[in-house]
Structure formats: C-alpha cells, structure tokens
Amino acid sequence: MDKLWHTTSIYLYPSVHEYVSKLAEKMPGDLKVVYFVNSGSEANDLAMLMARLYTGANDIISLRNAYHGMSPWTMQLTAHSTWKYNVATGGVHQAKNPDPYRGEWGGKRCRDSPVQTTRSCECAEGQCLASEKYVEELEEVLRYSVPKGKVAGFFAESIQGVGGTVQFPKGYLKKAFELIRNYGGICISDEVQTGFGRTGEHYWGFQMHGVTPDIVTMAKGIGNGYPMAAVITTPKIAAVLSQAIHFNTFGGNPVASAIGSAVLDAIDEDNCQANSHNVGTYFLKKLEGLRNEFPNLIGDVRGKGLMIGMELVSDRNSRTPLGAQEFVNIWETCKDMGVLLGKGGFFGNVFRIKPPMCITKEDVDFATDVIRTAIKQNKDRNTP
C-alpha cells in the first residue's frame, strides 16, 4: 500500500481534513465542528457529554419508544424495556411518544407522509392538534422531573427506527425544540438511520421538521457498512471539550475518511436522495394498496422516502399487535422468496423496510408481490 492506512487524530493527515470539509458542507447553519467516532452509541454518548458540559445541567429528555444505543449512558436514552439491562442508571427522563397511529392522540391528517393512518382525526387541513397535546406532555416532564426546571438536552430521532418507523405529528419536533431551549437545554438530532438522503425530500431527517439542532449524531449510512460515526456541532458547544483532553484512537482514521468521502460522492453522483424520494413514495403507495387489500392484517403503513414501516395487527380497530409466530411466518416466507425485511417496534410486529437507496421500481414491484404471497400463504395456513 502506498498510502498511510492508520494514524490517530494526534497526527494530521490530509484525507481526514478533506472529508471533514465535505461533510460539514452538508450541514446547515453553524454546525461545522466534526468529531469522528466508531458507532452510533459512541456518537450519542459523546453528544450526552457535550450537552451536560455546555449547559451545566445533568438531566436529559428522550422519547418513549426511542432507540439511541446500548452503551451504559445511551441505554438510558433508549426507551424500550426489551433493550435494557438491570443496572443502575439515572439522569434521563422519557416523555410520551408522539405516535399518530398507536399513541393517545393523532389521526389521518397528522403525519408528513404519502400514506396516512386510518384513525379518525379532529384536525383541520394543515393543522395538527395532536402535536400540541404531546408538547404539553413534554412540558409536564420538564416541570416535574428535572431539577429547578433546568435541562441539559433533548434527544430525538427524526423518524424512530428500531421503534418501528414511527413518525411524529406535524410540527411536534419544532415546538419541542423551542420548549427545550426555553428550559436552557440543547437539542440533539439522532440521524443514525434517517441521514444522508434516505428520507428523500431532504438530506437530513431533521430538515423535514423545519428545525436546526445544536448537535447531530450519525452512523450506519455514513460509511455504507464500514464502522464509523460522527458528532457534528457548533464551535461554541464544541469548545467545552477543551476542558480536558479528548481523544479517539480510530475515529476519523485515514481509511474511514476515504470511505466516508467516497460515500458522499456516490450519494450525489448516483442521485440516491432523489431516488429515495421517487422510489420510496412509489413503494409506500404500493404498500398502501396492500393495506387496502388486507385491511384486517395491515394496520398501518408509514414513512418517508426509503424509510418505511408496515405494522401488522390481528384487529384493526383495537390495533392489537399480530402474534409473534404469525408475524415470523410471514417474515420467514418473504426471506425464503428472496426479500429481506427488518423487524421492529416494541411488540415486534412492524416490518422495517430500509432497502439500499439505489433500488428501482421493478425491485419494489417484486418485493410487494412477495409480501402479498407471504400474507396469502399465512392466511391459508390458518384457514381450517
């Protein structure tokens, strides 16, 4: 090899700085300082540290049903009991999840998606009453759970990933950010699953909510499978790390930087963001057709671009989750026929569909046909 493939950030190396410049150009506003790490958990861990140092407060808010990692600190942010170990934690509080399909409030006018929930809705066109109610619940947590009304930060995925591709009501995140900042906190967007054009209309998921966070964390798509991640923030917030020595052995190594830079180029050159929007919208509408075809099984279809969720239920009115064995039967049949789908949601009854951003409409047609066949085969098995 004629190029250096490993050196730590103690030493300057051109590819690291070239990559930082390209990545920072993708960010809005003053989000220009980049810290490289190796995983999403590590990125969120560092963001928690920055928030606490910058504000001088300890308490952090996340949302129920959220997933932000499995390190000792980020496990506190994650609000799925199925992902938690019985060890001492503290300083993180969860607010009610603003879920238009399964939550207390929400309905058919509340989501920014080509496909809406079938729940009834009192909202007028262009208005979302549910977001106001969920923000009130967030303020209840701030009033009663954080010391003297001071909070360090608020973490949110732009669309909840592990939780089952859950979208928030329109306007929720913007109002939540305003509220958190009024309480002295900073706002952290977890873009581990929604970043790099996957949601289609925007390069970053937070942009569809009309917000600019104070810290952004990213992983997964940043390296197209290579283990790397990053934290991006403002110079003012980044300055707090000068209080002590900060160092990461492998973060931003030359190989990772070359890969990350190539990924940015490929996304632009191959028009992956536009493809995510066009093919993703097509996919969502095809799945909406399946929901109409199987109304007693498919409770909800949701998402943006190529970040899609399809929730299976045994009763559409009560939204009772489909039993584990039936879900797995359909899931395994899809796999056997050549379509790999993710599995998520608290009850494990959601197909998490996040295919490569280069897929075609022909791929979507094939996947839709496979899902339809798998559902019919499962129905036949259960018919006496």
Image (spheres, rainbow, N blue to C red):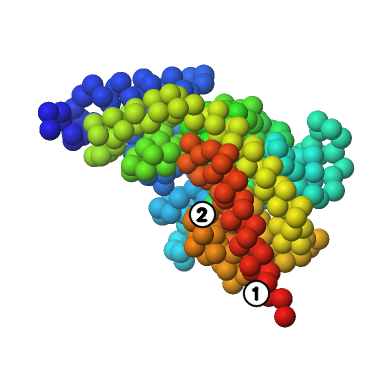
Nearer to the camera, 25 or 50:
25
For mark 1, give the secondary structure: helix
Judge left or right: residue 334 versus residue 32.
Answer: right
Q: Given the image, on which type of amino acid does mark 1 rest?
A: Arg
Q: Given the image, on which type of amino acid does mark 2 rest?
A: Val
**Is residue 193 shown above or below 371?**
above
Q: Label 2: which residue?
A: 339
Q: Residue at point 48% right, 36% down?
A: 358
Q: Position of residue 86 (x, y in %)?
A: 46, 66
Q: Position of residue 190 (x, y in %)?
A: 51, 39
For mark 2, give the secondary structure: loop
Mark 2 or mark 1: which comes first in sequence? 2
Asked if residue 213 can be seen in this view, the reply is no
Q: Which mark is residue 81?
A: none
**Is residue 72 shown above or below 86?**
above
Q: Residue at point 71% right, 47% down?
A: 288
**Can you tell which quarter of the image residue 270 is in?**
top left
**Can you tell which quarter of the image residue 211 is in?**
top right
Asked if residue 270 can be seen in this view, the reply is yes
Judge left or right: residue 261 versus residue 92.
Answer: left
Q: Position of residue 331 (x, y in %)?
A: 55, 62
Q: Label 1: which residue?
A: 381
Judge left or right: residue 152 versus residue 115.
Answer: left
Cα distance between the residues tagged 2 and 1: 20 Å
Nearer to the camera, 185 or 30:
30
> 10 Å neighbourhood of mark 1: few (<14), some, or many (≥20)?
few
> 10 Å neighbourhood of mark 2: few (<14), some, or many (≥20)?
some
